[in-house]
Every structure is written in C-alpha cells, then in structure tokens.
Image: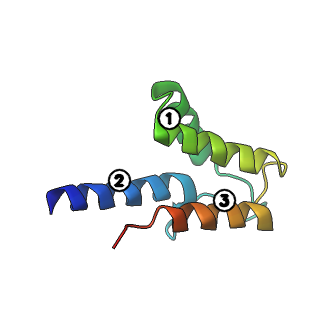
C-alpha cells in the first residue's frame, strides 16, 4: 500500500509541477504565457536534477511552449492533456 501511495504522490507532484493546478496556474491570465514561477522552477529542476525523468519531462514541456512562441495554444494544451493522461495511475 505504501508503494502505491508514494507512486500516486509522485504522479500528482509531477503533474502539478508541469501543468499547474486550479489555484496555481502555470499561465499568466493576461497574455497566456508561462508564469515566472513556473519558468524558475523548471530551470532549477534542469540544473539540479539533469538526466532524471522529471528533468526530461520539464525539457519537453519547455520545448512545447517555445515552439509556439512561449504561449498557451491548442497544441500546447493537447501536449499537456496527453502528458497528464499518460501519467494517470494504473488501476
């Protein structure tokens, strides 16, 4: 049971770090660009934890935004939705 709880906590944290949450959105409402906090945390993960699965996911996330001028677009939302759906717990 503990292993399953740990795995679920990791999944939740990973999704929150990469996608945000209702009360901590990853995009600025006014211009639909990534918030400074999300950019900062992402850069710290890349610097402190290179070669990890989390750093790899952060890098993919940044690439998805950068390909679209750093803005929230339909393609970015599709990528984010696919990411979250791929990281759902196995039941």
Of badges 2 and 3, the one in the foreground is 2
* Residue to which mark 2 is pinned: 10
**Residue 81 position by quadrant:** bottom right
Please tell me whether mark 2 sits on a helix, a strand or a loop: helix
Q: Is residue 83 left or right of residue 77?
A: left
Disc 1 versus disc 2: distance between alpha carbons?
15 Å
**Residue 19 position by quadrant:** bottom right
Going from N to C along the chain, the mark reached first, 1 or 3, is: 3
The residue closer to the viewer here, 21 or 77, is 77
Residue 45 numbered tag: 1
Residue 82 numbered tag: none
Question: Residue 56 location, x and y as percent?
Answer: 56, 39
* Residue to which mark 3 is pinned: 27
Question: Residue 61 location, x and y as percent?
Answer: 64, 48
Going from N to C along the chain, the mark reached first, 1 or 2, is: 2
Please tell me which residue is depicted at 53% across the width and 68% down the height of the picture.
85
- Visible in this render: residue 73? no
Question: Residue 70 location, x and y as percent?
Answer: 78, 49
**Quadrant for the N terminus in the image:** bottom left
Please tell me which residue is depicted at 25% across the width and 55% down the height of the picture.
6
Q: Is residue 73 left or right of residue 83?
A: right
Of badges 1 and 2, the one in the foreground is 2
Disc 1 versus disc 3: distance between alpha carbons?
18 Å
């Amino acid at each position: 049971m503990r292993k399953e709880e740990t795995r679920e906590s990791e999944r939740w944290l990973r999704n929150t770090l990469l996608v945000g949450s209702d009360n901590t959105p990853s995009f600025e409402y006014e211009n639909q660009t990534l918030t400074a906090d999300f950019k900062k945390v992402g850069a710290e993960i890349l610097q402190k934890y290179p070669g990890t699965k989390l750093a790899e996911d952060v890098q993919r996330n940044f690439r998805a935004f950068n390909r679209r001028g750093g803005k929230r677009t339909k393609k970015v939302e599709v990528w984010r939705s696919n990411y979250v759906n791929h990281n759902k717990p196995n039941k």
